[in-house]
Each structure stands twice: as C-alpha cells, then as structure tokens.
Image (cartoon, helix red, strand yellow):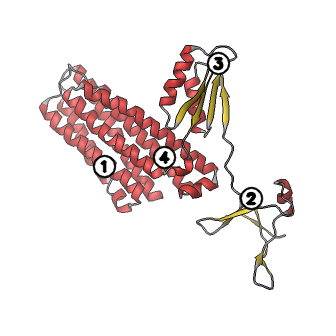
Amino acid sequence: MPYCDTGLSQLELRKLQQTPDGTYLVTIPKAWAKRVGLGAGAVVSYEERQDGRLLLSPKIDEERAPLEVVLEPSPFVRREIIERYLLGYDIIRVQSKDSLPPAVREEVRRTTKRLVGLEVVEEDSRRVVLQCLVEPSLLNPERILRRLEMLSMPMQLDAVQSFLSSNGELSKGVVERDEEVDRWYFLLVRLVRAAIADTYLLEKIKVSSVDCLDFRLLASYIENFADYAVTIAENTQSDVQVPKEAQTLLEKIGQAVNSMYKDAVGSVLSRDLKLAASIAPRLKETKSQLSEAEARVAGSSRSLVNHLVAVIIALNRMVEISVDISDLTITR
C-alpha cells in the first residue's frame, strides 16, 4: 500500500474502486479495524467536514460519558476546582474520609459562583458534588467574546471616571464587575479547549482549531484589559484631587483608549483588516498625551503623583493591548 510522508506522520493512500452500478468503494485498514473493535456488520459513521474531507468514526457519534474527578479537601481546593473546570470535567467531587471542614465547604461554594454553569447537585457531611450543566455544543465563542467586550469597555470608562472624581462607589463597582469578566473568560477557555480536543465539537460550533487559538488569545487580552481597569479603580482615593487641567486631558485619553479597544476587538470578530490597520497609528498620539498628563502634575503632592503614575501605566498597557488585539486580525 503506497504511503505519503507529510513530515509529521505517514499518510496512507488508497484507490477508489467502482462497482458496475457506479457505487464507489474504498477499503479501510485491517489493523485499524481490529484495534477499534470493528468486524463484519459493524456500523461506522462518516461526516463531511467543512474542508471537504470525510471524517470516519468506528461508531455513530453517541453522547459521551461525563468526565468525573474526585478532589480531596486542601488549602488549594479553589485552584483545583477551577483547573478541572477549565480542563472540561463535567462532575467534580470534593470529598473527605471524615466530615468535610466548614472552611473547605465554604470555599467550594464561593468557587462555584465564579464558574458559569457549575452547580452544587449533591451534598452531605463528607462531600460536595459539583456538575457543569452547560452543553458546549450550544455555546458560541464569538458571543462569549462579545459579552466580555461589553463588560470590559464600560469598566475602563468608569475606572477613569472614578479616579478623576474620587468616587469610591464607582470604583467598587468596577472591581465587582471584574468577577463577571473572569466567569465568562473561564467559560471561553473551557469551550475552546474542549473544541480543540474534539473535532465533532469544532464542527458543531462552526469554528476551526485556528479560530480557537485566536479566541483564546483574544479572551486573555480582554481579561488583562479588565484587570488594568481594576488597577485604575483601586487607585481612587477620596483625599487625592486631580487638577482640573489634568482631569480634562485624562478624560480625553480615557475616551481614546476605549475607542481603540472597541475597534481592535471589533476588527478581530468582524475580520476587518482596514479597521485593524487603524489601531497602531493611534498608539503614538495616545502615549504622547499620557506623558503630557504626567508632566502636568509633576510638581503636585507625592500621593497624587504616585497614584497618577499607576493610572498612566495602566492606560499605557491598555493601548498596547489594543494593538496586540488588532494584530490577531492580520494573522487570521
């Protein structure tokens, strides 16, 4: 049987045969049939891929068995639950040989609230059973990314406003919304990991493996953008007053940063190369304005200068993130 060396593995070549009535036939490798347990009369399934290939499976696509894991109570239970969630586990059992410590039980409940679709389905004195009730094939990664964008954009604007107006309540709201960003970010990571590992799921959600990699990177950039919004909000101080001149400039910069970010994310999701190309040229002007804002308060109190520098650094990183996001459009 002829082979074609692809550089990664050997691709076996087989010739089509045709019966007198015009039906095409192709044999399958005997060794493969034995390995997957196929014999005469066995049923196989095939599915046409978007790229024109046929995907042959040893049996009809059935509902897969849920992935389960058992975790022991530990100081790292939060991290372990999140890790298993991101790896695609459907059922996570946190159980102890004796009574489950109240602190662990409470940490499990707090962690559950941070993960979309994860619910407590069973509980007794020794265990808490969590199950993810979200069906991945019904999710749309682009909609999740749009949701992340709509959460993070106003966070940035509100963070700048809270700093300029010394509004503690507004800054608190920004920090609280970051938890919602994390929830949707974790869901996106879970989905793209599952899709990359499952060709059937890729087909069902109508994306490619390359799309998944870009979506994962885009989600990471968005999550970082939201984190910098939190940094700005956390620098809000009731006893720190930004001079009026600097306030006006920073408000203008905040709007410019938000516009760059909106266009960058939009260029990726709409595959708009022209819009993506408009992002980088705006970087130099925005950075120049940030340097000007810092210079205007150079002689102010140390407290104001320290907080303002932290805000300027965060805004600088935000515009750089926007450029990085726009680069994904070019490489798609």
**Mark 3 or mark 1: whose residue is earlier in sequence:** 3
Residue 226: image location, x then y, percent = 37, 37
Residue 180: image location, x then y, percent = 41, 35
Mark 4 is on which residue type? Leu
Residue for badge 3: 126
**Is 157 on the left-hand or right-hand side of 272?**
left
Mark 4 residue element: helix
Mark 3 residue element: loop
Residue for badge 4: 217
Judge whether 249 appears above or below 128 on screen.
Answer: below
Judge whether 126 appears above or below 223 on screen.
Answer: above
Would you say the residues marked 4 and 2 are in contact, meaning their CB atoms lie under 8 Å apart? no
Query: Which numbered circle lies on residue 9?
Result: 2
**Residue at image coords 61%, 39%:** 87
Residue 168: image location, x then y, percent = 25, 24
Q: CA distance from mark 3 to mark 1?
A: 51 Å
The quarter of the picture where residue 67 lies is: top right
Q: Nearer the viewer, residue 251 or 167?
A: 167
Would you say the residues marked 2 and 1 are in contact, meaning their CB atoms lie under 8 Å apart? no
